[in-house]
Amino acid sequence: MVWAGGGEGLPLVPPGSAGRASPTAASARPQPGCGGSAAGSKVTMEVSGLPVELWRLILSYLRLPDLGRCSLVCRAWCELILSLDNTRWRQLCLGCIECRHPNWPNQPDVEPQSWREAFKQHYVASKTWTKNAQDFESSNCFYLFRRKKDRHVLRVGQGCEFDTLRAALASADVYDRIVLLPGVYEEQSEIILKVPVEIVGQGKLGDVALLVSIDQHCPTTRLCNVVFMPAWFTPVVYKTTSGHVQFDNCNFENGQLQIHAPGTCQVKFCTFNQSSIHFHSVALGVLENCEFTGSENASVTIEGIPSSERNWACKHLTTLAKSHCVFLQASDPALCNASKRGGWGGPPVRSLRTCEIVVGGDQNNLLPASKTQLVLEKAGEREAEVNGKLYTAKEGDAMTLETDSSDGELSTSSENEDDDRSMYKLSYRAHGLSHMLAHVIHSRPQTSGLTALQRDLELKTLQQELQRDKEAQSLASSLQGCLIRKCLFRDGKGGVFVCSQGRAKLEGSVFRELTYAVRCIQNSKIIMLKNDIHHCKASGIFLRLAAGGLIADNNIHSNCEAGVDIRKGANPLILCNKIHSGLRSGIVVLGNGKGIIRSNQIYGNKEAGIYILYNGNPIVSGNHIFQGLAAGIAVNENGRGQIIENVIRENQWGGVDIRRGGDPVLRSNLICCGYSDGVVVGERGKGLIEGNTIYAAGLYVKSSEALNIIANAIHANHDSGIAVLQSSQLTRIANNSISCNSLGGVLIESEARVELRGNGIYDNSSHGITSKGDGVVVENDIIGNRGCGLQLLQTADMKVTKNRIQSFWDYGIVMLDQTKGLVQENLIFQGRAKKTILQQVSNAEDCIVQNNKLLTFKSKSDVAWTLENPPARPYIEGSTRGTSSATNSQKVTTMSTRIAARMDGGCHNNGSIFCTIL
């Protein structure tokens, strides 16, 4: 048999082209079976002598050897033979009883790239079971006979020389072929296979059934086109402990295959109905294009460390496996943008509001600020309620502290409000975190930070991850234990079970409607690439007891429990998967589970996208977690973890929900456009919240534990930027940018203890800071807010020092009710309303107001005010700094009104209250 070279679909060579035997020879019609004589004769059959369609019709009657001979005539003939791909080659491939559709069982409706190549692979595979096989030591010259073309064919069946398989095997010589005629063959005791043979069923698959138990004691064997069923005395239908066995196009019914090291196997195009395969310390086994249905336990079990002792077939199987490794294939770029579509090749799970955050595209397409600063109706109602309750009715009786100064009057020559506002405006755009807001504000960013931010937040492909992570690359290319490729597991209990330090690799397989797809335990490792796992009754993938490996580029969806479940010390690497539409969480990490979860798309799950609890401690970075029906990431029950550089958006509950002892590091994430708060820190929640951009979502704290909120950009949220409802331990809010929120910048309730230091609180639609609790407000910039700069209400007990405050419309500082504390050394920029400090407290001796400074404006010709020494806060080393210098027109007036002489902490430590997400 000769296979022609060259590619498929090549154009026909016209007469006179190079490669023809004779350009002047007469045309002749080829006849079936005479290709060889045509090639050797003096008369060359011209391809151009007949229409191509007629040639294809004629050649469709040729047998396989004749097609090979015709392809050797000349280049034109070779190209003509290659052009038969969708006709004769397809017919030969599907007509062979040893072959099935090349994409069976997962995609039998998808045409292969080349039917000729697919048929070639089938043909070559039928010969490789003898390739490089070791000869028996007792026969030094055996190789001469093994290569003989006239090996014996033994027939078994009614009217043949053998009635039973056992009888035929007793008479068979090495590498003989045993053909079983249609029928049922039952053996009452175990068959010992002592010599290499090939056993092939005649007719269609299902015509030949074997009720046997075979124990292989020879170097190699092949079985094809046979149905295996267990004998009455054992469920094991086939076992090998040393040799190599190849199964092609077989069915296994209610039986078991057992492969023990150093034995190996290759199973292709087989069906397992309520049957299973057990690998025991096997160095390498290959399962390709197989279907597993109705299993009562795991369909494939791999246990034990792969043996260092290898048989002759390991080298052949390794070469075969590496030649078709799926991770070397280029990923479909269209799939990398599935987060924009909200689904796997389709629309989102439900109609959700979208967020046009640009993290990798043109800067001209940035989200307009007009869309981000809409004040919700409820926000307007709450603001009116707050303003009306606080001092509308009381202002007439209030003690107003103003400075008598000849240049303190504001100019009234302005023709409109905009002119007045621009006169008193303080620029803060170049503060230390401005680069973090560049991708959510309308104007083109002025810093170089946006490019790096977009590059960091853009979802990486598997190829990019493998290029930057040598460990992941090594795992993806490793090959040990069992390779399962392009198989279908359905309608059973379990798919693949790996235990006791076993090793397995799964590529391009489908797991559906099982109890679980993959279970990996006891220091085992599993590598999963490009599999489809869905509609499992429990979790899709379980990892337990220090299991590990690589789970990459899989589509995991619609499972009843978690898509991936990691616990009890398991530590896998989870890259570039799509985990979506689950009835519970996408990924669960608990019970001291670890893992690296990176560059995944996790969306549309009914519970948290990633759920960390019970001392789970993963590293979660670079993921897109969106459109979940609960929280994006939930950290509860003493869960920990590092949550870094993720995009968490459009989730129904909090973007990140931390409570009940959860203690994560939440750093450099983009958390935006949620239907609830961006970050929720509930009952007993704690941790570090640092360097995040929280946009159109907000931050909500109601915890009894200490919390650090540092260097975040909290922008354009639909409520207050930060709301601290309860914090019996100190909540430290430092160096944040809190701007353009629909209500106030920071809200501190009466049961809270807070330190506000070094923040920039700008342009919020209500008050900059409203506090009813205890703590300190030190060195903040509170500028441009629609309401007051700072309000102290009810039983607030605050130390307010060294802040820069301006309210264009309202008072800089307001103190009402039973407020206590110290207000001193603050710089107040006077606004259009000419209001600085409003004080109405029940006991003036409990409140000290002293050494505050007022900046007033002399005339319209004055240079605009600037924030300097330091520049606009948050002031962070290495960030963009504003430049300014004081001018003579900025007049400083000192206020020193002593009201009382006491400053107590006044902190409260009440019990925690359960935090309910509305």
Image: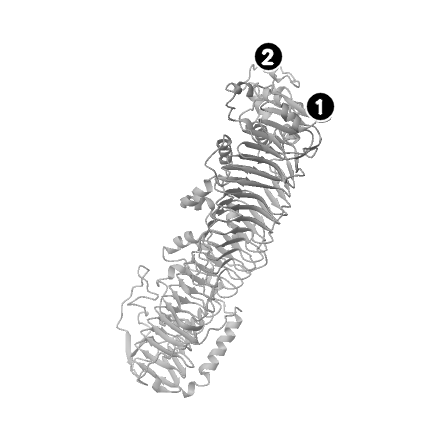
Identity of the residue furthest to the bottom in this view: 397
Asked whether residue 257 is in view, the answer is: yes
Q: Position of residue 503 (x, y in %)?
A: 49, 43
Q: Amino acid at mark 1?
A: Cys
Q: Residues within 10 Å of mark 1 (few under 14, many from 20)?
A: few
The Cα atoms of the two marked residues, 1 and 2, are separated by 43 Å
- What residue sits right under mark 2 in the picture? 41
Kindly state the secondary structure of the residue where label 1 is placed.
Answer: loop
Give me the disc on residue 50. Answer: none
Identity of the residue furthest to the left in this view: 888
Q: Considering only order in the chain, which callout, 2 or 1, is on the residue closer to the N terminus?
A: 2
- What residue sits right under mark 1 in the picture? 160
**825 vs 314, nearest the viewer:** 314
Identity of the residue furthest to the right in this view: 159
From the viewer's perspective, is 401 left or right of 360?
left
Kindly state the secondary structure of the residue where label 2 is placed.
Answer: loop
From the viewer's perspective, is 475 left or right of 264?
left
**Image quadrant for the N terminus?**
top right
Q: Position of residue 331 (x, y in %)?
A: 50, 43
Q: Amino acid at mark 2?
A: Ser
